[in-house]
Amino acid sequence: MNGNSKRNAARLRGTAMVGAALLAVVLTGCASDSTAPGGTPEPSLTSAAPVESATPTYTATPTADAGDPAGWTVSETGVGPIELGAEFEEARAEVPAWTVEDACSWTAFWNDPDGTVTAYFAEDSEAPDGVATIDVAALTDAVVPEDAPRTAEGIGLGSTSEQVHAAYPDAVEQTATVGDATLLRVGEPGTIFFTFQAGSDVVSAVTVTSRDEPPYEVCG
């Protein structure tokens, strides 16, 4: 190889080395800068760390306060913690402050400290088979539903017949067998009864019973 050829080969090798170096710089710049034309960053392909969802917490439904019957709910199966069909002694254990008299041992009584509301639950004295009647009654005309147990719809002592019918369109009216009270029955016989004394349009008693109607008296 002559001198000119050697010089040309040397220049070609130098040019190739410079080109390789420039290419490496360009590639490095591309790898470090992911900004798209116009200055908008390209979305990263790196997946985000999964976000753990919070575990839901549940609050238990509070049980009826045995010492506060005014907060109890009346339903077709019972009143507050007292349920139809429950063993009498088991029901008494739910409300230890209620009293039982020797002369009426099948009945437990409660009276509001203010003397405005009275209540009882009883089994059938002739055929004891668990709690058969739970009754709440007003002792004054000033009682309102919030003073005593009431239904989930807010109906209780002091509610009007119009309010009862509005809450329970299928309520059936019947006359008490004994006495002159008018009854509004919700559901089939043996469920919830709202009692209206003669000449009155407000509920004077709320009764849940397995009987065909609320008993006229419980200890007679």
Image (cartoon, rainbow, N blue to C red):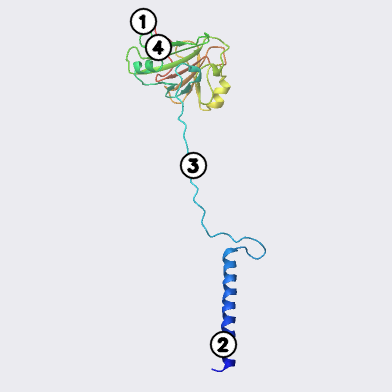
Task: Residue under label 2, please give it.
Answer: 9
Label 4 element class: strand
Q: Position of residue 28 (x, y in %)?
A: 57, 68
What crowding class fits label 1: few (fewer than 14 Cα within 10 Å), some (14-19), or many (20 or more)?
A: few
User: What's the CA distance linking mark 4 and mark 3?
Assistant: 48 Å
Sequence-first disc among 3 and 1? 3
Sequence-first disc among 4 and 2? 2
Q: Amino acid at mark 4?
A: Ala
User: Image point 54% across, 11% down: which residue?
Assistant: 198
Front position among marks 4 and 2: 2
What crowding class fits label 3: few (fewer than 14 Cα within 10 Å), some (14-19), or many (20 or more)?
A: few
Sequence-first disc among 1 and 2? 2
User: What's the CA distance linking mark 1 and mark 2?
Assistant: 129 Å
User: What's the CA distance linking mark 3 and mark 1?
Assistant: 59 Å
User: Image point 56% across, 20% down: which residue?
Assistant: 161
Task: Residue under label 4, please give it.
Answer: 108
Marks 4,3: beta carbons within 8 A: no
Task: Residue under label 1, please give it.
Answer: 103
Q: Amino acid at mark 1?
A: Ala
Sequence-first disc among 3 and 2? 2
For the residue pair 148 and 201, the one nearer the viewer reads as 148
Sequence-first disc among 4 and 3? 3
For the residue pair 58 and 207, the one nearer the viewer reads as 58
Say if 83 sits above or below 32 in the image.
above
Task: Residue under label 3, please give it.
Answer: 54
